[in-house]
Amino acid sequence: MDAIFRLAGRVQMLKQMLNVRSWPFWKLPRFLAVYVAAVILADAAAIAVSAAHLSVRAHDLAVFGLLLACNGATVELTRRTSEPEGHVKDVHAVWELPTVVLLPPLYALLMPVARLALTQWRIRKAAVYKRVFTAAAIGLSYAAASLTFRGLGHLALGGLGLGLGPSPSPSFSPGWAPGTRVTTWIVLVAACAVVQLAVNQYLVFAAVRATNPATRLREFMFDRQTLRNDLTEMCMAVLATLAIAMSLLTVLIALPLATLLQRSALHAQLVKDARTDSKTGLMNAATWERGATAELARAVRTRSALAVALLDIDRFKVINDTYGHMTGDEVLKEIAHTLNTLLRDYDLAGRFGGEEFAVLLPQTRAPDAFRIAERIRSAIAGLGIIAAGRAGGERVHVTVSIGVAALDAGSQREYAELMAAADAALYRAKGCGRDQVQMISTTRGLSAVGSIPRAAGGEGHGPSLFRRAISS
């Protein structure tokens, strides 16, 4: 019976794949769809050109099969922990860079296709166009790296040995001597690896930026942890290429090392996942609390200003009940995106509860914190979220209530006291009609309220009011 159900599921999946109009690709923004198609077509053209100029040799096929098997083993290692979502670091370059350097270009173009097809089959199903685009981006980066290696190689080494000829051999040429040439060859392989990484990262970044304009190139490519992982993988790939060029038996040594590096990369991803909220990508409550506590201690020690804002989505249960939990998740993601867009690099944003977010604003005085909170409230109120599956694309109106607590420069407050003040301000914002900002200064008793709803204030969404609080 189970076999019948599995067969029926596969038939249904095949029908969906054959129904071209139902592909998620057509739902992409026009610019992104054109870009993805252009990258895929460019990779297909590179494969066709390389295939037309390929001289098939048994030795090349054997080397390619061995490297492909090692790459597949690395994919299988991921199966135990599942494939993380998003753009993550792997160690497949350890097997794919030797393919770029030691074999004709066609093999390097085909390697990511085989690897991602295996990932799709064995690890996790993803949108096919995403897999194809990823394989195309990696393939084009390998093509650029292959051209770089062969071009610079002919200039530096005169095309002698180690893959600098039209059909490279995976072993040292008899006329190629150690010493200066070894150093030069390693530098060429490293340069090839840098070109591959840069081209691939930029192609992927362009697609990510089209989806999320708030993505910064510096954070995407030059984050400290990312650079450390890239450098480690690059060094391992260069060493593996050199070792495999000397003898194919070194694969037996390289495979355990690559396995260990893969586990290290997965561990780093798990640590990151433990620090972030899975739905929004913001800090989770525990991570945010640790960061906020440290920032508050620093503010007290340096006698600088600081503020905390708590955001609560108004009537979030009604949104879930009316439009479904998928739409509710989209609301959470859009609010997180709004926070990432409006906040400064050194501000801390986290998901504090089911529909509650927390923001820490270092070096921020009370009036400035209030203005930031009001800007966030206004941006969220203007979000154009469309309910999925609704006829006519019904817009979901989302508002938030925000409570702000400000710590004046030179004040002495504990984390619990500051959060209690922000929570009190949030409770007051909820009680006064929602969709507004309330603020409490923990030292001067300064209170503020902004964007008072018409039903509550009778004045509409007018200017903010500052006053001395009766109790704070």
Image (spheres, rainbow, N blue to C red):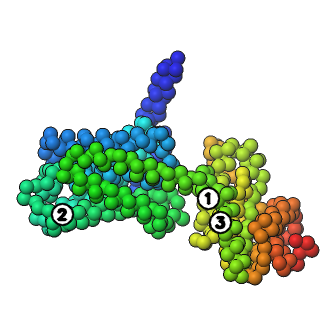
Which mark is drawn over residue 282?
A: 1
Residue at position x 67%, y 69% in the image: 294
Whole-percent x and y of residue 47? Answer: 25, 48
SS at mark 2?
helix
Distance from the alpha carbon under mark 1 to that under mark 3: 13 Å
Comparing 126 with 249, the one in front is 249
Q: Is residue 188 visible?
A: no
Please, what is the three-letter code of the amino acid marked with disc 1?
Leu
SS at mark 3?
helix
User: In which image quadrant can residue 226 be found?
Assistant: bottom left
Q: Is residue 243 visible?
A: yes
Please, what is the three-letter code of the amino acid marked with disc 2?
Val
The relative height of residue 183 versus residue 92 in the rendered view (above or below) is below
**Label 2: which residue?**
182
Please, what is the three-letter code of the amino acid marked with disc 3?
Gly
The relative height of residue 235 versus residue 64 in the rendered view (above or below) is below
Residue 143 horizontal side relative to residue 459, left or right = left
Distance from the alpha carbon under mark 2 to that under mark 3: 48 Å
SS at mark 1?
loop
